Image (tube, helix red, strand yellow):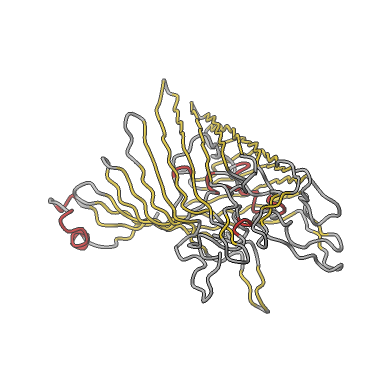
């Protein structure tokens, strides 16, 4: 990584005033480290949802969070091929400084270039390319060895990956939680995972404690699901797209975050975690117990009456992993009021539960591993809100079963450069729900098989 001096001790002293103590020579001027990664993969992808027959929908099914779909004209049909190449570049900028009293400070900006859904045509000759740059994380931090660290900005929470245990993804591209999703179309949410990284980098404040006798603690708070603040708000007419809207028409339909960015009913999200890390006779162990909670926006009737249609997020999670001589095994289990992709459930929906198991082994330059998960959630809920009556109607639907597994391997060819091969299978099932609207009839099952080979360069 390249280092660039940003300032002098005089500048830092002026900024922090009395907090800076002598001797000034003990201070470290802030530096910038520029890094990132480039990933490039060839994929063979075979799944349901690869065609639209005449007269069927051309968009994803109208599952919860996606809204209703128009029905295409009879000639609006398509077929998808099974081969593609995906490129994922990213840039990471880190700023670090230190004061003479031991206080460290800095910031992080992470920029991704493959986060858009694709080439979204907005008008003639105007569209958004998939390579459009988008900020993933951007936060400032203050830390002290005795008091812990505070992060302020767009960042993961303690249960969003900062302190979780049991999620074994250090092989291939991450197995069932890896890059295969970039080859899968959004058919019925078949690629959508309920994993730590999916909770979101919404604007929040995070506290991470120092370690005491092997234990540390973390907590975070986010007022809503939006990033950067004022998401969707600078309009002449306010709507539910504004992340500060606590009540809006259509809140029930975005209980699961919508396909577009930063649009969900989740409000006042908080996360807490307690973790233990230690070593016994050469065996490294880590265990985490945590909780994720939030409120939910209210829906509104045609007359402007506010109606509570959604349950709050209410999720407990435990996870543990152990490592010995290159072998790592782990598992995590969560249960509570949640739907897939960390969505809020509609009142009357069943609660959700999920089990994740994984293992990885490293010997010299080679790493191999496997992971899987199995989840039981409400899925595409049969409950809908009537803006006319203010009532929730119900149609019979079964619970949704989701499971997937991944096998992967890495070969470290050079420092920072890995050659990667991976296979992932993913499946969802739900009775009385059409999971493949491009085909005639009610398709209650969706699946995908993805083979990946490629390379990753980290710098």
Q: Residue furthest top?
A: 281
215 to the left or right of 117: left
405 to the left or right of 267: right
Residue 242 vertical placement versus 217 (above, below)? below
Total labels: the figure holds 0
Q: Residue furthest left?
A: 22
Image quadrant for the N terminus? bottom left
187 to the left or right of 442: left
Q: Position of residue 190 (x, y in %)?
A: 69, 48
143 to the left or right of 349: left
Name the foreground residue: 208 vs 27. Answer: 208
Query: Image point 52% across, 59% down: which residue?
Result: 112
Q: Position of residue 89 (x, y in %)?
A: 54, 58
Query: Image point 61% across, 47% down: which residue?
Result: 345
Query: Image point 34% across, 52% down: which residue?
Result: 141
Q: Position of residue 39 (x, y in %)?
A: 57, 53
Name the foreground residue: 6 vs 62. Answer: 62
Q: Position of residue 184 (x, y in %)?
A: 69, 52
């Amino acid at each position: 990584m390249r280092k660039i001096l940003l300032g002098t001790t005089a500048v830092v002293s002026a900024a922090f005033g009395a907090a800076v103590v002598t001797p000034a020579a003990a201070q470290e001027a802030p530096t910038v480290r520029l890094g990132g990664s480039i990933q490039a993969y060839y994929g063979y992808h075979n799944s349901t949802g690869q065609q639209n027959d005449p007269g069927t929908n051309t968009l994803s099914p109208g599952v919860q969070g996606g809204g209703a779909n128009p029905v295409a004209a009879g000639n609006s049909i398509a077929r998808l091929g099974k081969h593609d190449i995906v490129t994922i570049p990213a840039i990471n900028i880190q700023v670090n400084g230190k004061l003479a009293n031991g206080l460290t400070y800095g910031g992080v900006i992470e920029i991704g270039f493959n986060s858009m859904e694709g080439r979204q045509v907005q008008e003639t000759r105007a569209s958004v390319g998939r390579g459009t740059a988008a900020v993933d994380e951007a936060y400032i931090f203050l830390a002290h060895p005795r008091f812990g660290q505070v992060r302020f900005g767009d960042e993961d929470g303690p249960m969003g990956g900062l302190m979780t245990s049991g999620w074994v993804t250090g092989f291939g591209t991450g197995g069932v939680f890896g890059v295969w999703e970039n080859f899968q179309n959004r058919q019925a949410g078949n690629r959508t995972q309920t994993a730590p990284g999916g909770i979101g980098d919404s604007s929040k404040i995070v506290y991470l404690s120092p370690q005491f006798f092997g234990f540390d603690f973390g907590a975070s708070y986010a007022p809503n699901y939006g990033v950067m603040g004022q998401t969707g708000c600078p309009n002449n007419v306010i709507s539910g797209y504004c992340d500060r809207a606590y009540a809006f028409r259509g809140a029930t339909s975005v209980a699961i975050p919508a396909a577009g960015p930063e649009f969900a009913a989740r409000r006042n999200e908080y996360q807490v975690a307690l973790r233990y890390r230690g070593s016994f006779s050469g065996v490294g162990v880590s265990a985490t117990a945590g909780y994720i909670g939030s409120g939910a926006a209210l829906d509104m009737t045609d007359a402007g009456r506010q109606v509570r249609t959604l349950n709050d997020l209410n999720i407990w999670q435990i996870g543990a992993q152990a490592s010995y001589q290159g072998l790592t095994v782990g598992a995590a289990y969560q249960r509570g009021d949640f739907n897939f992709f960390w969505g809020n459930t509609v009142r009357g929906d069943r609660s959700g539960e999920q089990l994740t198991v994984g293992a990885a082994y490293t010997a010299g330059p080679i790493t191999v591993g496997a992971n899987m998960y199995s989840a039981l959630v409400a899925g595409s809920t049969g409950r809908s809100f009537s803006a006319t009556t203010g009532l929730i109607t119900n149609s019979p639907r079964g619970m949704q079963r989701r499971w997937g597994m991944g096998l992967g391997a890495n070969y470290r060819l050079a420092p920072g450069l890995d050659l990667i091969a991976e296979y992932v299978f993913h499946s969802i099932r739900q009775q009385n729900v059409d999971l493949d609207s491009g085909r005639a009839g009610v398709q209650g099952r969706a699946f995908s098989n993805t083979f990946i080979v490629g390379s990753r360069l980290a710098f």
